[in-house]
Amino acid sequence: AQSVAQPEDQVNVAEGNPLTVKCTYSVSGNPYLFWYVQYPNRGLQFLLKYITGDNLVKGSYGFEAEFNKSQTSFHLKKPSALVSDSALYFCAVSEYSWGKLQFGAGTQVVVTP
Amino acid sequence: DVKVTQSSRYLVKRTGEKVFLECVQDMDHENMFWYRQDPGLGLRLIYFSYDVKMKEKGDIPEGYSVSREKKERFSLILESASTNQTSMYLCASRGGQGLSGNTIYFGEGSWLTVV
C-alpha cells in the first residue's frame, strides 16, 4: 500500500525568505513522486516530479524538491518566497509508473509581504 | 499545453437528482480520472479509466458511476445526489509518451452543491 503525509497544515513565511513544504511517503517499491499547487477556486497545477535520477528536481516557478530515499521524504523548496506563492500545495506518490496517485492532505502556504 | 476542460464550474442540484459532470481532454490521453476534494482530506479517487470503455473503481466509488464512450471524454454520474456529495470534483488525464509521460493534468474543477 502507498501513503503520503504532509505534516504541516499551514506554513507561514515572510516574502524573500526560504520556503519549505514537507512531504514523507511510504511505498513498497520505488516511488514516483509529484508536487502540485492549487490556487483558490482552481484546479491543480503540476510543479515537478521525481521518477529516477538526480535527487534534486527542478520545476516550475523556481521550485525544487529533494528526494531522500533513506528518510522517505520529498520536500518542496523555494529559495526566496513571493506573495504570489501563497496557495495550497499537494504532494503525491505512486508505486508504479502508471499507477494511481495517492495525495496528501495538502499544506496551505501563506507568504506575507 | 494539455487542456482538460470541465464544462460546469458551479452547479446547484436538489437531493435525489441525477447529476452529470462532463470532462474533455484534447491530448489524446489514454488515462482519465475523477477525484473529489474536501477540506482536510486532500484528493480522493472516485473512478479512473485506462482506455475507452474501461473503468476501475477508486477509493470512494459508492454513489457514483462513470462513462467513457470516447477517448477524449470521461463523465461522472451521480445517480441520486445526496447532500454528502457536496464537494469540489476534479477531472484529470494522463498521457503515455514524451515529456508529459506519467504526469497527471487537472481541469479547473466543478463545485457541486446538493441542497
Image: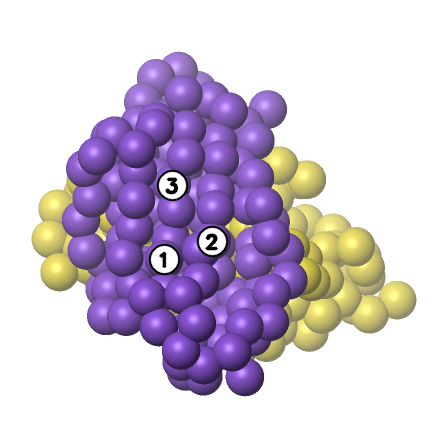
Circle nearer the viewer, 1 or 3: 1
User: Residue at left 46%, top 67%?
Assistant: B37
The residue where tag 1 is placed is B77
Q: Which of A32 and B70 is in front in this view?
A: B70
Can residue A22 be seen in the rendering of this structure? no
Could you tell me residue B55's position as x and y percent? 20, 44
Q: Residue furthest front?
A: B17
Q: How is the image coloured?
A: by chain
In the rendered image, the quadrant that contains the N terminus of chain A is bottom left
Q: Give neighbour class at mark 3: few <14, some 14-19, many 20+ (Cα, 10 Å).
A: many
User: Residue at left 76%, top 66%?
Assistant: A111
Contact (CB < 8 A) between labels 1 and 3? no
Contact (CB < 8 A) between labels 1 and 2? yes
Q: Earlier in the sequence, mark 2 or mark 3?
A: 2
Can residue B79 be seen in the rendering of this structure? yes
Q: Earlier in the sequence, mark 1 or mark 2?
A: 2
The residue where tag 2 is placed is B21
**Colour chain A is painted in:** yellow
The residue where tag 3 is placed is B74
Q: Is residue B109 left or right of residue A55?
A: right
Q: Which amino acid does label 2 sit on?
A: Leu
Could you tell me residue B104's position as x and y percent? 41, 39
**Colour chain B is painted in:** purple
Look at the picture and state if B108 lies above or below B102: below
